[in-house]
Image (cartoon, rainbow, N blue to C red):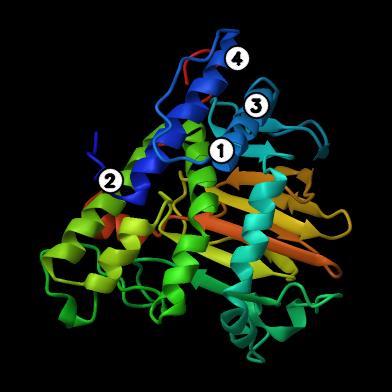
């Protein structure tokens, strides 16, 4: 198991993951929760982790089989498993506390300029940033747009699938995403810390092998950045709390039916939603399952395999979509993981 530097923010994520796993297991098995080392986790984060764990325990006890006999519409915490026992969806409405949603809303304020300039009028096929898919905020509290944030990632077309025994000057190495390269980038990384802890702690329960693969990847990237004196990358990796290496911040956008090809098939991507908007339905079309996607919800699935869409045309909605870039794991030599399996007792 990877050794996480104790002075990295990721170490607090590790403690958070242990806490959530302990609460979920104790709840399912009707046992008392053991005393845990909470490190530097503040009270608001601990309350959020407890709420997350309770919702996850409910979902784990409410498993539904895929494919369903008829189209299903889910509104309560649930998981969906296939005929071989693989977990393909975690649905966690009410998993985020009001404090975490306020935190997410506040984080987007430091990104407002980046969000505003992310919108394009290019070909409609480039729908993720096309102006036609965004709506304005009714009160100006949310800036429409979509940006990708990462302490270390590959720009499109520059992936290199080998271990990093190479000089980063060759132009085919990971780099800090554009959103983090200037002075405001430091504020952005810090503003995402609580959110990164929450989604990572959730993944510790959802898919432990993937969670540890993400941990190992971040630590290996940090060592590589230190070796080549990539100070900015190393700075952000030290303060990045998520086991996911990329997060997309998506504000007031509707999404046409799509898959996300850069994600690992057996991996979970985690989406959260916050804001004030009319009830929205997330449709997993090829699963014949729809989900009530109210503010405070978490959805986890393989977005590479699941064809999904969501329409939001009024109000304020902030979606964070956390995922692992497959090429980054390949770059540092992190082995691929298998699908998560459902085990009613042992998690």
How many marks the image carries: the answer is: 4
Residue 46 seen from this side:
yes
Label 4 near label 1: C-beta < 8 Å? no
First in residue order: circle 1 vs circle 3: 1
First in residue order: circle 3 vs circle 4: 4
As measured in the structure, the alpha-carbon distance from the residue carrying label 2 to the one carrying label 3 is 27 Å
Q: Which residue is mark 4?
A: 28
- Mark 1 Cα within 10 Å, few/some/many (few <14, many 20+)? few
Find numbered disc 1 in the image and state the secondary structure of the residue it sits on. Answer: helix
Label 4 near label 3: C-beta < 8 Å? no
The image shows residue 198, relative to residue 87, as above or below, that is below
Occupied quadrant, residue 259: bottom right
Label 4 near label 2: C-beta < 8 Å? no
As measured in the structure, the alpha-carbon distance from the residue carrying label 1 to the one carrying label 4 is 24 Å
Q: Which residue is mark 2?
A: 216
Q: Which mark is residue 43?
A: 1
Q: Position of residue 327 (x, y in %)?
A: 33, 62
As measured in the structure, the alpha-carbon distance from the residue carrying label 2 to the one carrying label 4 is 29 Å
Q: Is residue 66 left or right of residue 42?
A: right
Q: Which residue is mark 3?
A: 54
Label 3 near label 1: C-beta < 8 Å? no
Q: Depth-wise, is mark 3 or mark 4 nearer the camera?
A: 3
Label 3 near label 2: C-beta < 8 Å? no
As measured in the structure, the alpha-carbon distance from the residue carrying label 1 to the one carrying label 2 is 28 Å
Q: Depth-wise, is mark 1 or mark 4 nearer the camera?
A: 1
- Mark 4 Cα within 10 Å, few/some/many (few <14, many 20+)? some
Q: Depth-wise, is mark 2 or mark 3 nearer the camera?
A: 3
As measured in the structure, the alpha-carbon distance from the residue carrying label 3 to the one carrying label 4 is 10 Å
Q: Residue at x 75, y 70 (%)?
A: 252
The image shows residue 49, relative to residue 255, as above or below, that is above
Find numbered disc 3 in the image and state the secondary structure of the residue it sits on. Answer: helix
């Amino acid at each position: 198991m990877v050794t996480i530097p104790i002075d990295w923010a990721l170490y607090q994520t590790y403690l958070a993951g242990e806490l959530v796993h302990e609460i979920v297991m104790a709840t399912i098995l009707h046992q008392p929760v053991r005393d845990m080392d909470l490190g530097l986790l503040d009270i608001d984060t601990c309350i959020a982790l407890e709420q997350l764990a309770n919702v996850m325990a409910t979902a784990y006890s409410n498993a539904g089989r895929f494919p369903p006999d008829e189209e299903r519409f889910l509104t309560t915490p649930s998981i969906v498993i296939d005929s071989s026992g693989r977990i393909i969806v975690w649905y966690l409405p009410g998993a985020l506390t009001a404090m975490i949603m306020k935190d997410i809303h506040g984080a987007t304020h430091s990104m407002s300029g980046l969000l505003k300039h992310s919108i394009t009028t290019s070909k409609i096929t480039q729908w993720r940033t096309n102006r036609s898919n965004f709506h304005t905020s009714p009160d100006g509290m949310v800036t429409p747009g979509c940006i990708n944030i990462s302490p270390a990632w590959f720009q499109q077309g520059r992936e290199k699938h080998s271990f990093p025994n190479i000089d980063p000057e060759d132009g085919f190495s990971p780099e800090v995403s554009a959103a983090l390269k200037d002075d405001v980038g430091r504020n952005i990384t810090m503003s995402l810390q609580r959110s990164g802890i929450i989604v990572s702690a959730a993944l510790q329960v959802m898919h432990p092998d993937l969670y540890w693969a993400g941990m190992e990847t971040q630590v290996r990237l940090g060592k590589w950045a230190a070796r080549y004196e990539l100070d900015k990358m190393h700075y952000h990796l030290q303060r990045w709390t998520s086991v996911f290496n990329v997060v997309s911040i998506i504000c007031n956008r509707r999404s046409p039916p799509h898959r996300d090809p850069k994600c690992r098939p057996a991996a979970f991507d985690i989406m959260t939603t916050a804001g004030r908007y009319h009830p929205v339905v997330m449709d997993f079309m090829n699963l014949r399952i729809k989900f009530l996607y109210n503010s405070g919800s978490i959805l986890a699935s393989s977005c590479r395999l699941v064809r999904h869409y969501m329409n939001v045309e009024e109000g304020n909605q902030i979606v964070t979509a956390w995922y692992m870039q497959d090429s980054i794991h390949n770059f540092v030599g992190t082995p691929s993981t298998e699908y998560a399996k459902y085990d009613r007792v042992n998690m």
